[in-house]
Image (cartoon, helix red, strand yellow):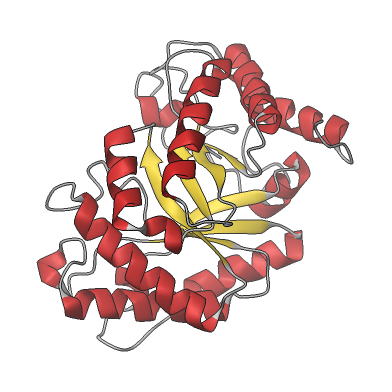
Amino acid sequence: GEMLMLKESRFEYIRMDTMWNSVESVKGKYNFTLLDILVDNLKQAQMKAILILDWNNPLYDDGFSPHSEEAIEAFAKYSTMLVGRYSGLSFIFEMWNEPNHVYWTPQVNATAYSRLAIATGRAIKSEFPGEIFIGPGCLGFDYEFLESVMEEGVLNVFDAVSVHPYRDSSPEDVVNDYNSLRALINIYKPPNKSIEIVSSEWGYSISSNNIDLNTQAKYLARMMLINYANNIQVSIWYDWHDDGANPTYGEDTYGVVGWQYFPENKTVYTPNPAYFSAFTLFTCLDGFNFE
């Protein structure tokens, strides 16, 4: 049901947390069952994924984001095992989600994030050099944070820089930010290494952005098109389905489909106009490249 709707919408990628704390709930033992089910469904639907290597683990560092040598080593091992398990599928592996925000604890720390990212990237690349490793999944264009992690050397291990270009203004306003970010990348990237930009999360909420459903649908198409025009190779629209039924709560009104699940129906979620916007855009542009 749900995977069929995703496939029929013509989205190519999903983005999903991998939840270190769920995979390694006992030190040194790993349970990939839930991720295996997801990946099997993606294979059947001929879809790809950005898998986020993320979240704290109460087994290490008192449940804060990994910063001790033991926790960094454990996180890098878990990440490398995960990448190896799903290698060869054209997946993308992203280092954390919004570490410049509340998701890095106990507080934002660019140096600590960079140490973890570099150790994890080196471990992954030593065994699976062909797999795509990106980061930091930065909330907005936080240039202070982005420059800090680049100064620490993350571009030695990242294949692309991922950002979440949320804004209240229209999608086309992102162009100057992409240009500024590229200029920053060019300062810090290793010589002769090409590093692209990935828009790994971006959407418009009906309530938070004070727009209607039709405007949201237009913004989805315009976001995808402006990203194509700026050579953003992968774009993730947030969100697939609404997170709840409260029309005044921001997280409940980002979805291209509604919140209520109808398991007895072929169409298990009610499509919003943004769903048809995505389908129309991807169908019409199938086989075309932006020049």
| Percent x, y of residue 1 | 68, 52
Residue at image coords 52%, 56% = 191
Q: Quadrant of residue 88?
A: bottom right
Q: Which residue lies furthest to the right in this view?
A: 287
Query: In the rendered view, would you say 19 is above or below 163?
Result: below
x, y percentage for residue 249?
Answer: 34, 24
Residue located 66% across and 43% down the image: 233
- Quadrant in the rendering for residue 171: top right
In this rendering, the answer to whether 137 lies above or below 114 is: above
Q: Which residue is found at the position 66% from the left and 58% from the top?
A: 48
Q: In this view, does 84 lie to the left or right of 287?
A: left
Question: Quick one: which residue is furthest to the bottom in this view?
Answer: 28
Picture layout, residue 167 above or below residue 72: above
In this rendered view, identify the residue nearer to me: 180 or 162: 180
Residue 159 appears in which quarter of the rendering? bottom right
Q: Can residue 44 be seen in this view?
A: yes
Q: Residue at x 46, y 43 (%)?
A: 185
In this orientation, which residue lies closer to the viewer: 231 or 16? 231
Quadrant of the snapshot with the C terminus: top right
Task: Indicate whether 77 appears above or below 217.
Answer: below
Asked if one can make out residue 82 in the rendered structure from this viewpoint, the answer is no
